[in-house]
Image: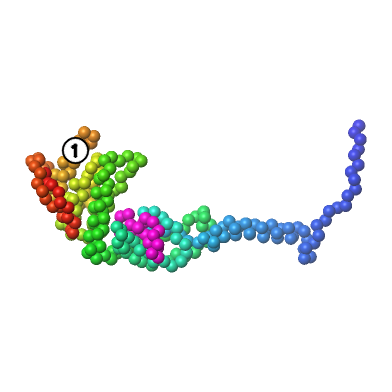
Amino acid sequence: MKRRIDLPQVEEVKLPELLHMRPGIYILILLVLALLLALFLIAFYPGIRNGGRYVTFTGSLSESGVLLDGTYLGSAEYQHFVKSGSYEVSLTKGGEVYAKFPLEIDHPVFLTWLFHRTLVTPEVPLSLSEEQRTAINRFNLEQIVQASAILSYDDRNRYPPLFSNLVNDMMALELDAQTRLETVKLAVLYISNETMLEEAKRAIIDSKTPIDGDVTTLLDTANLLFADDLQHTSIGSKSSSLPFNAEKTTLKAGDLEIEGYRY
């Protein structure tokens, strides 16, 4: 038979009253206040401290840059976080500002860290002089010239859609048909690899850019250059073979002139 254990006599513990409230009441109030404080810190404080929206800027031209109150923000192809406030936005291409508009960002606060508030700006009409249009078109051509220095592209060294940018920007700039034709004729001369060739053909077909026999011949010639690694397809009308005799000539695209040889 087990011996009975006598527990020592202790006084009953009683919590004191607070402001004439029983312990159960003010403990409940403290728990509610702690819960409200946690809700404020989690749901509202981050938005109050750093309010703003993730903005997508819509540019009429490809690969446009964004200036926010004169400070470069980045490319219009990506979302950018803009704090609450009033701003003046400038869209640029090739160093030329082609559109300006005001931007108002409100101050959302609830769970902004969890649910990003977004905004897409409307497309703004172009405001360009003839010289600025020419400069932007020349910039697109220079991008193609620089890309032609690379003879092959892969997953690590990716090729940007330069011909698509060129033809789409020419349409947005409302260049006349002759200027577009001369620009394309000049651009295809710098095709130096299969990737550029395929992208150029897709861009010309998709945009329905006007071409003539010279452009068709140049594309067919490029097809022959890469025939060993590429199952080529030609666009436009079939052209006859040309004698391979060099003749000095000048290529013109608007104000841009380049001396070279025609074969």
Give above or below for 24 relative to 245: below
- Expressed as whole percent of the image width and height from the top left, the position of residue 132 reads 25, 62
Relative side of 31 to 203, left or right:
right
Q: Nearer the viewer, residue 60 or 228?
A: 228
Could you tell me if residue 24 is visible in this image? yes
Location of the N terminus (image quadrant): top right
State yes or no: residue 65 in magenta: yes
Residue at 23 percent of width and 46 percent of height: 200
Q: Quadrant of residue 151?
A: top left
- Expressed as whole percent of the image width and height from the top left, the position of residue 170 reads 23, 56
Residue position marked by numbered label 1 in the rendering: 225
Q: Nearer the viewer, residue 250 or 154?
A: 250
Relative side of 165 to 178, left or right:
right
State yes or no: residue 2 in magenta: no
Q: Nearer the viewer, residue 112 or 141?
A: 141
Location of the C terminus (image quadrant): top left
Label 1, secondary structure: give it.
helix
| Magenta extent | 58-76
- Expressed as whole percent of the image width and height from the top left, the position of residue 24 reads 75, 58
User: What amino acid is at disc 1?
Assistant: Leu
Give above or below for 62 relative to 90: above
Residue at 29 percent of width and 48 percent of height: 161
Judge the density around disc 1: few (<14), some (14-19), many (≥20) Cα neighbours within 10 Å.
some
Residue at 91 percent of width and 42 percent of height: 6
